Image (tube, rainbow, N blue to C red):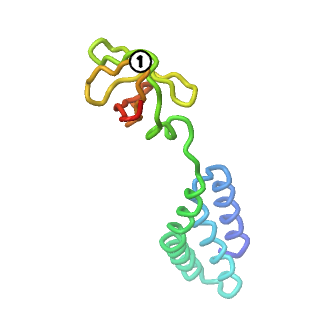
């Protein structure tokens, strides 16, 4: 394969990366670019293919963990993910047996269930332990 073929492969993988934004195809694009450079020095397609495979594998193994760490490090929790651990106020008695209960967390009302199947009275402060569907699972706090 000549350098134009490798450039086409590079563009395809780069375009796929732009569409996916998942850091999945960029490694193949880098490998194709290395194979493109190799094709300028040798016409042997086996050597070019080996360079493509080796460089792709190397950057995938060596650089991907670093890139993922830095990219995911800046991601902020949103909506449901940010609720766990927050303190809310019970606005309607929480009673798991009768499937009742509401809490207000950061100004938003949530259906609530208690973690220990205890009845928690309105006005009590609770901590969100987890989120199950549209319900928050809470436990009482010592603060009133």
Q: Is residue 68 left or right of residue 119?
A: right
The N terminus lies in quadrant: bottom right
Residue 74 lies, in percent from the top left, at 60, 56
Residue with the most extreme top position: 98
- Above or below, 28 relative to 44: above
Q: Is residue 39 visible?
A: yes
Secondary structure of the residue carrying tag 1 is loop
The residue identified by callout 1 is: 122
* Residue at 53 percent of width and 63 percent of height: 69
| Residue beneath the point at 63% across and 77% down | 35
Against 52, residue 103 (above or below) is: above
Q: Position of residue 126 (x, y in %)?
A: 40, 31
Q: Quadrant of residue 27?
A: bottom right
Would you say 115 lies left or right of 12 here?
Answer: left
- The front one of 63 and 144 is 144
Q: Position of residue 131 (x, y in %)?
A: 41, 33
78 or 92: nearer the viewer: 92
Horizontal side of 49 relative to 144 (left or right) equals: right
| Residue occupying the point 64% across, 54% down | 16
Q: Residue furthest front?
A: 144
**Residue 95: image x %, image y %?**
31, 17
Residue shown at 58% from the left, 51% from the top: 75
Point out the image quarter for the C terminus: top left
At label 1, counting other C-alpha atoms closer than 10 Å, the crowd grade (few under 14, some 14-19, many 20 or more) is some
Taking 119 as reference, is 7 above or below it?
below
């Amino acid at each position: 394969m000549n350098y134009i073929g490798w450039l086409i492969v590079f563009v395809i993988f780069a375009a796929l990366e732009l569409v996916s934004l998942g850091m999945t195809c960029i490694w193949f694009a880098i490998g194709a670019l290395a194979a493109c450079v190799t094709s300028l020095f040798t016409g042997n397609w086996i050597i070019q293919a080996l360079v493509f495979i080796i460089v792709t594998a190397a950057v995938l193994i060596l650089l991907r963990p670093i890139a993922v760490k830095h990219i995911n490090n800046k991601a902020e929790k949103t909506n449901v993910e940010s609720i766990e651990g927050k303190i809310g106020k019970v606005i309607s008695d929480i009673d798991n047996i009768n499937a009742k209960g509401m809490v207000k967390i950061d100004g938003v009302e949530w259906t609530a269930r208690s973690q220990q199947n205890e009845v928690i009275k309105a006005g009590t402060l609770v901590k969100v332990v987890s989120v199950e569907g549209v319900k928050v699972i809470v436990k009482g706090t010592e603060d009133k």
